[in-house]
Image: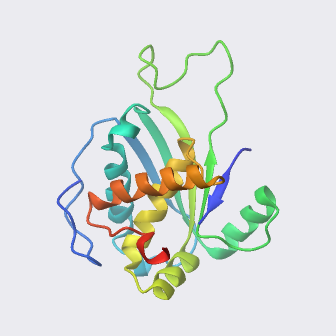
Amino acid sequence: MDQSGDISGPPLAVGAIDTEPPSELGAALEFDIVRDTGDWTTFEPVELCVARALNAAARHYRILSELPACVCIALSSDASVRALNRQWRAKDSPTNVLSFPAPPQPAGRPVPGDAATSEPRFLGDIVLAAETVAREAREMGISAHHHLQHLVVHGLLHLLGFDHEQDAEATAMEALETEILATIGVADPYAAND
């Protein structure tokens, strides 16, 4: 399985989470949010937090061309993510987010998301580790909600083929993440790292 790992509404105040449901995008980006394991109470209302990040990404002009699509978000724990990281990346440690792109569609089959089908294209799975995400937010002195939203956008971009292995790729991906997050009031997550 191919994979990568790492680490709408009106803008939110820094550190706040809007409790209004995100505006609907129709079937442009469908998503399932699954509570697997881990303590996600720090991030409540976690489903709304994740949905706002995904909807913000779906509204961005560079992502609209990839829609309609669907994605699955697994809210997990450090232990589960560590096991996945060990199995798929040969790294025996937890990480904040893992992205598992869906395998390519076999030749000759209609590709979901094409005009010929009414079915959205499955992009893949994003798995988040509650303890690592919360710890990183505390260490950086930022909102846990905002850090989670950043990682959701980051994971989604990996599913869309973005990467940060080369400096130019990293710069482009970070700029796109920053643009998307700004639409929901999340400060540039890379500003403090400069």
Nearer-the-camera pick, 19 or 165: 165
In the image, is residue 131 above or below residue 3? Answer: below
Which corner quadrant of the image does residue 89 belong to? bottom right
Which corner quadrant of the image does residue 116 belong to? top left
Write the residue at 57% across / 49% down.
169
Whether residue 12 sits left or right of residue 169 in the image: it is left
* Residue 156 in picture, x, y percent from top left: 49, 50
In the image, is residue 106 above or below residue 29? Answer: above
Write the residue at 37% across / 73% down.
145
Whether residue 73 sits left or right of residue 56 in the image: it is right
Whether residue 78 sits left or right of residue 21 in the image: it is right
Write the residue at 68% across / 73% down.
94
* Residue 148 in picture, x, y percent from top left: 44, 69
* Residue 166 in picture, x, y percent from top left: 64, 52
Write the residue at 42% across / 80% down.
41
Which corner quadrant of the image does residue 126 belong to? bottom right
Nearer-the-camera pick, 158 or 106: 158
